[in-house]
Image: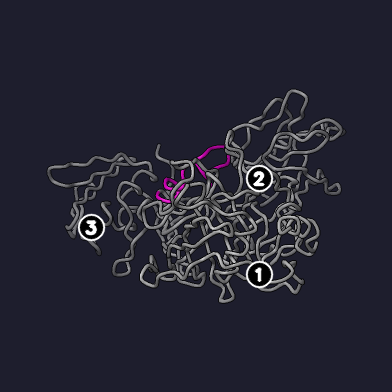
Amino acid sequence: MKRLVSLLLGVTFLWGSLAACSAEPAGAEPATLPGPAPQPLLDVPPAGQVQTVAPGVRYYPISGRTWQGEPLKGHVLEVDPGQDLLELRVAVSGGAPGSTETLSRLAARHGAVAAVNGGFFDPSRGYPVGSLVQDGRLLAASDILRTSVGITGSNRVRFGYFVPRVTVSFGGSGPVEVARVNTAPVPGGITLYTPAWGERAASATDCIDLVLRPEVGKSGCYEVSEIGSGGSPIPRDGYVLTLRGSAVGACASLPAGTPVVVDFDWGPGWEGLKHLVTAGPLLVDEGQPVLQAVMEGFRGSVLEPAARTAIGVDKRGRVLLVVVEGRQKGWSAGVTLEELAYLMAELGAVRAAALDGGGSSGMWVKGRLVSRPSEGRERGLADAILVLRQVPVYLNGSRIFFDVPPVVDGGRILVPVRGIFEVLGATVHWDEKTGTVTATRGGCTISLTPGKGEALVDGRTVPLDAPARVVEGRVMVPLRLVGQALGAAVTWQDAPPAVIIEAKPVK
């Protein structure tokens, strides 16, 4: 009977959930189970196992019993989004859709404090199922209607259905809808390909490609540079519009130089959006479990007990990242989506949604995977949600990351020597006998030795404001001096805090 009630409630849940919801109560009456709530799932977490892994970030394991009496094991991260230098970020495997990477690898190469797996994806191709936004850029969009999880620039988490509107206008004409972004070409529609897709559009021989490049002297404006077919190259600073079937129309005869305006509208409720993954279903609304898995298209074995991952927000505004281990007999059986909803409510979530689960579920904390993979080994993921605490570093406008995050020492920023040398395109040599690191870039040479307060720059001895030192097995060096010695301009940005590097390509 309880399962039947759950299915009925999933179908009839309030349509008000279609709009994006902030972490605050939205005023809608949640759908709840009639009668008394099921028995609690969790034991009281042992106080001695709560660890502060970074300022504003706490981790602890959880245990209990499912409603069927099976063992339950899991993990919780509590994140205070208002802490200085703390950042919730969506990381994409390989830097762009179309590949997979383990959670451990993703987290380590970004210098993360902690991480969980992200949204659903096609494991055979590494492309997200639904939409994906990173740093305010739409990397993928489709018409699937499931709860998405968005993160604003102030680390606020929002839940709701994400239906972005992408339009193009040719030569001053009215806007035309783009059906999808970075997916297979849409029959009878327009597909937009961005540089995040790869080198070439995925158009077939029955498609027309409009290659768009920036219009000279007009910021944010584009023009048709050429018309092709069969997978045209995507400009690094532009787009390719692929038209198929009835969408071809008069666009196939547009002359080169036709101005084009591309407009992205996230829709109401998603203002300030920085990152987003499509996930689902919605689990908790106004502090009460809600059951809409069936309405969001989840069927069959997906509803059975399994490893699960969820994200929520409590009444204090803290972000809860939760992983339940599953399908490990005698250790943790996993939970249903219904049980996951009640578990998140028990943990204090006022709003929550599920992320990808099963073999994708995982939590990584301070250099190790704390959860046991249900398949016995880590699965490659398309994306993940990271918890970072570091000074952001940008090279020529793009964010760069190090496996050991930048360290502040006496007002100076130290970064891993090999990491900074490699992103600047320098040749690196390590002398094991003397412990000296030497880098050469474009005729400039710099040598440093950990513990010494000076460096050798093009044969000259230069004093260091902060000596190179070893942190977590990595030699850390002053970023400003190293960057400038190798021909780059390094500046500090106050609000928000960041290091800006400008470097010309090596000839």
Give the secondary structure at mark 2: strand
Residue sitting at x 59%, y 75%: 315
The residue under label 1 is which amino acid type? Ala
Quick one: 19 or 3, which is closer to the camera? 3
Is residue 101 shown in magenta?
yes
**As displayed, is residue 422 above or below residue 243?**
below
Position of residue 503 measured from the top left corner of the image (x, y, whole percent): 42, 48
On the image, the x and y values in percent for residue 60 come to 42, 65
Q: Is residue 261 visible?
A: yes
Q: Amino acid at mark 3?
A: Arg
Magenta residue span: 92-108
Q: Residues within 10 Å of mark 1 (few under 14, many from 20)?
A: few
Q: Residue furthest bottom?
A: 316
Kind of residue at disc 2:
Ala
Question: Which-is-in-front pick, marks 2 and 1?
Answer: 1
Nearer-N-terminus badge (3/2):
2
Q: Secondary structure at mark 1?
A: loop
| Viewer-side label of 3, 2 | 2
